[in-house]
Image (cartoon, coloured by chain):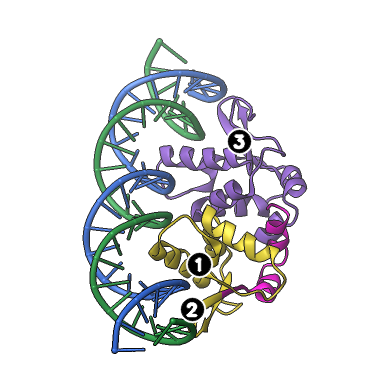
Chain colours: A purple, B yellow, C green, D blue
Amino acid sequence: MPDEDGHPSREEMSLLTVLNALSDPLRYAVVGALLREPEGTARTCASFNLPVSKSTITHHFRILREAGLVQQVDRGNSRAATLRRADLDHRFPGLLDLIGANL
Amino acid sequence: MPDEDGHPSREEMSLLTVLNALSDPLRYAVVGALLREPEGTARTCASFNLPVSKSTITHHFRILREAGLVQQVDRGNSRAATLRRADLDHRFPGLLDLIGANL
DNA sequence: GACCAGGTTCGGTTTACATCGAACCTTAAG
DNA sequence: CTTAAGGTTCGATGTAAACCGAACCTGGTC
């Protein structure tokens, strides 16, 4: 079962859920932006300057998190999101390369 | 521009559109079923026994066709759908392997 | 302690999409 | 020529999802 923050383990990840998460332009842009950064980069939700309200941003990050695409770590004041590269490469090899080639 | 049946060329394919097409369970199942078949297999829409009405089937196949996932060829009486493997492998290398590994 | 920035939660609205039935077209078979 | 099977088109409906504002929480800063 996912942890208390909704992060699934590698084995729990479902391709259908991942594809569904990626099928939204905003969420796709977030994953793409993280993919451009060096591995392990953590960014706050607000740093992406998404053209939607705060509550909608929370909504999108929850879907990304529950699909297993990003990991949100508590940084006291705020929460930073990192791309789960190793887990994704292991569970869905080729997926991140595919996205990286289509930014 | 797409042809008169809505088939995009390789270059016109968009990963976002493809992911959106694949994010529906029924459409994912259709692609998965075609992926199990030998390359070049053509199947009629009805042969998938989808648990929805005829008009809904038409709707789903249009989305698959306009995303570039399948090609629908007129067979007189009916229309047969084939997976566009070569085009997809060329434009989105690794995508079909990814789906094939998650059936 | 007052304040602010980053996030969350909670209803609510609006928009997108999956779904359907009915009418219609086309082709093949009887 | 009638029938039937496979698809399409056209509204219409229902539901899921994207979106918002307001209230709230937390942890820094002054």
* Residue A94 rendering spot, x and y as whole percentages: 74, 57
Chain of the residue under the numbered disc 1 shown in the image: B
Tell me which residue sits at (56%, 68%) in the image: B14
Give the class, few, some or many, for how many residues have Cα within 10 Å of label 3's Cα (few <14, many ≥20).
Answer: some
* Residue B2 rendering spot, x and y as whole percentages: 49, 81
- Which amino acid type corresponds to the residue marked 1 in the rendered image? Ala
Q: Nearer the viewer, residue B32 or A97?
A: B32
- In this rendering, is residue A27 above or below A67? below
Q: Is residue A94 left or right of residue D27?
A: right
- Which amino acid type corresponds to the residue marked 2 in the rendered image? Ser
Give the class, few, some or many, for how many residues have Cα within 10 Å of label 2's Cα (few <14, many ≥20).
Answer: few
**Alpha carbon separation for disc pair 3 and 1:** 48 Å
Q: Mark 1 falls on what kind of element?
A: helix
- In this rendering, is residue A47 above or below B25? above
Chain of the residue under the numbered disc 2 shown in the image: B
* Residue C14 rendering spot, x and y as whole percentages: 27, 50
Q: Mark 3 falls on what kind of element?
A: strand
Tell me which residue sits at (70%, 63%) in the image: B36
**Residue picked out by circle 3:** A80
* Mark carried by residue B16: none
Q: Is residue D4 left or right of residue D1?
A: right
* Residue A86 rendering spot, x and y as whole percentages: 76, 44
The answer as to whether the residues below labels 1 and 2 share one chain is yes
Q: Earlier in the sequence, mark 1 or mark 2?
A: 1
**Residue picked out by circle 2:** B78
**Alpha carbon separation for disc pair 1 and 2:** 10 Å
Q: Are marks 1 and 2 in contact (CB under 8 Å)?
A: yes
Would residue B82 be seen by someone viewing this image from the given angle? yes
Q: Nearer the viewer, residue A47 or C26?
A: C26
Q: Which residues are magenta?
A: B81-103
Q: Nearer the viewer, residue B92 or B73?
A: B73
